Image (cartoon, rainbow, N blue to C red):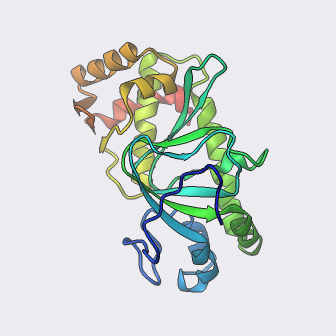
């Protein structure tokens, strides 16, 4: 199936994922938990595997899809970071989110049958592309897969509303860093050491702050012993204090 206007580079005919095998899902598979809960491994889900198209690498600045492109597929990030954004009527960019390995992009295209935003690679990105009509049919047979799709959609809605509240710059930054930490930990990565693949300007846009505010808060966090920062590498030194700051935004 082709997607007019949508850039989905391929790894080449017959090239398979290198972090899974005939029976085992990729370590960052966005759907493995839902499928395994149905008692099905990859061998039992050959029809699902046929749906999967491994795509990439996409290089920094390459688009996965653009606003207005026809919606026929969703994509799960296997490696790298994807930024979603819109351009407002004044020509200004509005960052909607950053998508990490194991997370899905494109679900917001279901309503309207077109992608309502742009998705661009921030670094070297590998994706799994799923035909949405086919995965929707499969979800009718696997109730847990259907529930998982709903959970992914509700998560996107919840995250989008987090930074619409009237919180301080410190609280917003703490929530952003803690959110990255927890999302990475859920996929088996380190919750304390990770790289900010997005620019300070993108972070500021996402948090609805000025870039100088983001830089100032990060410097203060480091001075106060919450973080250690070296260029884009971040180490969370005091997780307890970071969690306390983030609580006003995350409201657990």
Give left or right: position of 150 versus 40: right
Q: Is residue 25 visible?
A: yes
Give me the residue at 38% from left, 58% from top: 188
Where's residue 208, x and y in %?
A: 52, 20
User: Of residues 56 and 52, which is closer to you in this image?
Assistant: 56
Residue located 63% across and 52% down the image: 152
Name the quarter where the N terminus is drawn.
bottom right
| Residue furthest front as drawn | 4
Which corner quadrant of the image does residue 27 belong to? bottom left
- Quarter of the figure with the C terminus: top right
Q: Is residue 85 above or below residue 154?
A: above
Q: What residue is shown at x 63% (from left), y 38% (from top)?
A: 117
Q: Position of residue 107 (x, y in %)?
A: 66, 50
Horizontal arrangement in the rendering, residue 227 relative to residue 5 (left or right): left
144 shown above or below 102: below
Q: Position of residue 62 (x, y in %)?
A: 46, 44
Q: Position of residue 181 (x, y in %)?
A: 39, 43
Front residue of 60/163: it is 60
Question: Number of labelled discs?
Answer: 0
Image quadrant where residue 187 sits: bottom left
Task: Say which of 215 and 86 sits in front.
Answer: 86
**Relative to 233, residue 186 above or below:** below
Q: Is residue 32 visible?
A: no
Task: Locate residue 34: give its quadrant.
Answer: bottom right
> Residue at 62% of width from left, 45% of height from top?
155
């Amino acid at each position: 199936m082709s997607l007019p206007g949508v850039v989905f580079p391929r790894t080449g005919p017959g090239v398979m994922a290198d972090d899974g095998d005939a029976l085992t899902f990729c370590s960052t598979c966005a759907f493995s938990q839902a499928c395994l809960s149905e008692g099905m491994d990859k061998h039992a889900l050959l029809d699902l595997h046929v749906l999967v198209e491994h795509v990439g690498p996409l290089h920094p600045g390459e688009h996965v899809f653009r606003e207005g492109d026809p919606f026929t597929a969703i994509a799960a990030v296997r490696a790298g970071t994807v930024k979603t954004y819109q351009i407002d009527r004044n020509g200004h960019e509005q960052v909607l989110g950053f998508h990490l390995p194991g997370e899905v992009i494109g679900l917001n295209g279901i309503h309207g049958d077109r992608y309502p935003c742009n998705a661009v690679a921030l670094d070297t990105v590998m994706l799994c592309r799923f035909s949405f009509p086919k995965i929707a049919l499969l979800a009718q047979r696997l109730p847990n897969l259907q529930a998982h799709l709903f959970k992914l959609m509700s998560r996107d809605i919840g995250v989008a509303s987090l930074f619409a509240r009237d919180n301080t710059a410190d609280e917003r930054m703490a929530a952003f860093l803690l959110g990255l930490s927890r999302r990475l930990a859920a996929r088996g990565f380190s919750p304390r050491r990770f790289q900010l693949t997005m620019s300070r300007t993108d972070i500021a846009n996402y948090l609805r702050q000025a870039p100088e505010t983001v830089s100032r808060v990060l410097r203060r966090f480091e001075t106060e012993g919450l973080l250690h920062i070296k260029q884009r590498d971040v180490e969370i030194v005091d997780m307890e204090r970071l969690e306390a700051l983030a609580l006003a935004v995350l409201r657990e």
